[in-house]
Amino acid sequence: MQAEEKKRLRTFGWGLTGVFVIIGTIKLLIAESPGLNWQYIAAGSAAVVNLAAPILIWPIYKAALFVAHYLGWFNTRLLLGLIFFLMFTPLALIFRLLRKDLLDRKFDKKANSYWQYRERKEFDSSTVENQY
């Protein structure tokens, strides 16, 4: 196993240990009868395996990457869709109610061209130095 992969597995192992500790602590704070939770046993086991032989965490790591890939794919489409419809749809409705055409898309039968001329300005190098 390469050093980079071993480091990645150790980082994942400590993250897994932390997740189990957090879940166990939340359960301990919420539970009516506190006691030793299985989450603490799992956290201890993950920490020992992580220190002794991080290669044993590899199947869990691969499964987590597989699940994370598809969750990321789904969430990206869901979030982008929600942002689009929650942001642009009301904006479009407002502009239609106000009869605003910001893109100037009206059809004019009398126009020879839709080209919009700009006034010529003398080139100034300072305008291109800080574009953003």
Image (cartoon, grey):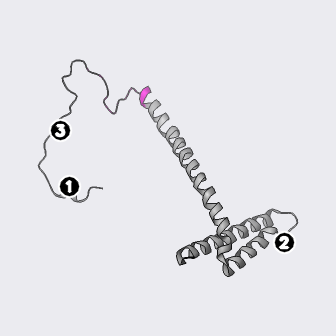
**What residue would you read off at disc 1?**
127
Mark 3: which amino acid?
Arg
At horizontal 65% and vertical 74% (from top left) the residue drawn is 55
Q: Which mark is residue 118?
A: 3
Q: Which residue of the protein is positioned furthest toward the left in this rendering?
A: 122
Q: Quadrant of residue 68?
A: bottom right
Mark 2 neighbour density, 10 Å: few (under 14) some (14–19) many (20 or more): few
- The residue closer to the viewer here, 99 or 35, is 35
Main secondary structure of the magenta stretch: loop
For this view, does 52 lie left or right of residue 115?
Answer: right
Calculate the distance from the C-alpha at mark 2 to the C-alpha at mark 1.
67 Å
- Specify the segment rendered in magenta: 95-108
Calculate the distance from the C-alpha at mark 2 to the C-alpha at mark 3.
75 Å
Is 79 rendered above or below residue 117? below
At horizontal 55% and vertical 46% (from top left) the residue drawn is 79
Say if the magenta span includes residue 97.
Answer: yes
Secondary element at image label 1: helix
Upstream in the sequence, badge 2 or badge 1? Answer: 2
Upstream in the sequence, badge 1 or badge 3? Answer: 3
For this view, does 129 lie left or right of residue 78?
Answer: left
Calculate the distance from the C-alpha at mark 1 to the C-alpha at mark 3.
17 Å
Q: Quadrant of residue 39?
A: bottom right
**What residue would you read off at disc 2?**
36
